Image: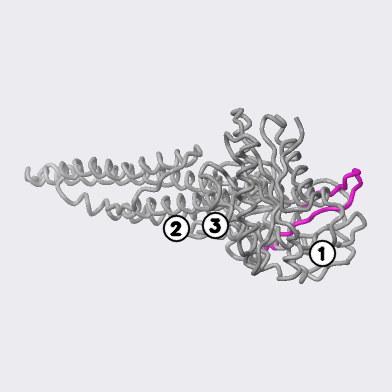
Amino acid sequence: MKKILYNQKFKLTTLLTSLVSVSVIFTILILLFASYQSEKGSLVKTYLSLNDSKSDKISKSVNSLFQSMRVSLKETANFLKENEGITDEDIQEQLELLRKNSRYFNSLSWIDEKGVVRNIAPISVGLKGHIMTGVTKEVLNLKKPTLTTPYIAPSGRLIVLMSEPFYDSHGKYRGIIGGTIYLQEKNVLNEILGNDIIDDTGSYYYVVGPDGKLLFHPDINRIGDDVSANPLVMKLLQGESGTQLVTNTKDIRMLAAYNVIPETGWGVIQQTPVSYVQELLKKHVQKLILYILPPFLILLFLSILVARMLAKPFIYLADLINQLGSGEQVLTPKTQSHWNREADLLTKSVYITIESVQKNNNKLTQAAMTDTLTELPNRRKLNEVMAIWANDRQLFSLIAIDIDYFKSVNDTYGHQAGDEVLKYLAKTVQSVIRKTDMFFRYGGEEFVLLLPNTKASETYDIAEIIRRTIENEISPVGKPITISLGISEFPLHSNSLDELFKYADEALYQSKLEGRNRTTICSHD
């Protein structure tokens, strides 16, 4: 054998060709292996980062929504406390108005301390007068703000109940103000979570409750399923957040991110199938084989160039995700097509994610600060502006405005006509006031006007112009309406915003006592 090999002669060209061929083959294998590992690590890291960013944004959006929902229930409880003499019809109207304007809850109810449903909106639910038992009764006995786990309500629906205890002005417990979310029907929560739930990568997210049951899922039939055996759900139930490669309850490997929603104790899990990343890697290797067909040196040069070109969009996207993760407002750049398919898909996915998250955040912020009927800033925005001005020690006056005999407008012409009157008042006042003045809808037929750098005496003249303008114009019901106004000044009348508003309200009440359709300046020093 040795003799045969020794006697066998090889041409130099053959040796060189073989050596080059072997070198090229091994180089190709090394490059393929290294590129595969690099791309795999980059894709895994990127998708974990994307999923973490998206789940975090969803968590914050839902958390902000539930904070607003809690504030809404507190304000309703305070309204009933401050207006103990109002009729059941007025309470029903308030609940209907709050439910329609905020769209936070599928239904709103007042359940008294004995468990009797005193009022419920919409009335079509059919539970008014019923005595509640089960979970609702347990919530009633707690006498504290509560958010339940999902349960089957007397109406037969799968719901979550958020409640706020209601005490009268003497401190007596009068029951709860409850808002329900129908988990398998349309509502604000469903609208927020329903945007871009599954993308073309197969990524999707779902929400679990504190008991490990599904509250939101792409497959609506799975809502209510117990997924507490999922290792990520176990971590969420322990209050943990993070990212992880996991095998879910369907035995599918996923790149997942999980975040806790602090306000509710719920958890959001966003995940991408590992099979999708593997498919991207497979296509990536196929492309590399095509690129390495040219001679070795050219191939090496091109490989370096390609690596740089591949890295560029991922670096850019990583910086973009970092900005988004740090809470900065990110301006989504114009859509660009990348020659690399993976980079192109990833870029489009990131842009879609950013636009969806920021669109949802903007909707939440706008909805939380705006009255949907009149399109005026609401009470929350009013409190924010007053707090800023007071903190800056800026002089300003406050006008509390109330439509005279507004209940008779609703009773005579209907609530739709009443809504038109409210919108008419909003537009008319805005046409009269100065550009620097700010007009808010406080609630019901009550409005508030803030006048910066304006004393009460000057404010009185402006208030009278507004009052006379309203008095002399034909309203949507075919005849003029009148308004009563009360004025207070910061810091002349008080340094406390609560007292300032109280004094303006007292002045408004004085206008009512003196015959309505008049303006009164606060008499407190």
The answer to which of 341 and 418 lies nearer the viewer is: 418
Q: Is residue 231 in view?
A: no
Q: Which residue is mark 2?
A: 201
The image shows residue 167 at horizontal and vertical percentages of 86, 47
On the rendered image, what quadrant is the C terminus found in? top right
Callout 1 environment at 10 Å: few (<14), some (14 to 19), or many (20+)?
few
Nearest to N terminus: mark 2 or mark 3: 2
| Nearest to viewer (mark 1 / mark 2) | 1
Amino acid at circle 3? Ile
CB within 8 Å, label 1 to label 3:
no
Q: Which residue is mark 3?
A: 252
The answer to which of 105 and 422 lies nearer the viewer is: 422
The image shows residue 507 at horizontal and vertical percentages of 75, 43
| Nearest to viewer (mark 1 / mark 3) | 1
Q: Is residue 333 in view?
A: yes
Callout 3 environment at 10 Å: few (<14), some (14 to 19), or many (20+)?
few
User: Residue 262 shows which numbered tag?
Assistant: none
User: Residue 89 shows which numbered tag?
Assistant: 1
Q: Which residues are magenta?
A: 163-183
* Residue 180 located within the stretch drawn in magenta: yes
* Residue 293 located within the stretch drawn in magenta: no
Amino acid at circle 2? Thr
Q: Residue furthest top?
A: 393
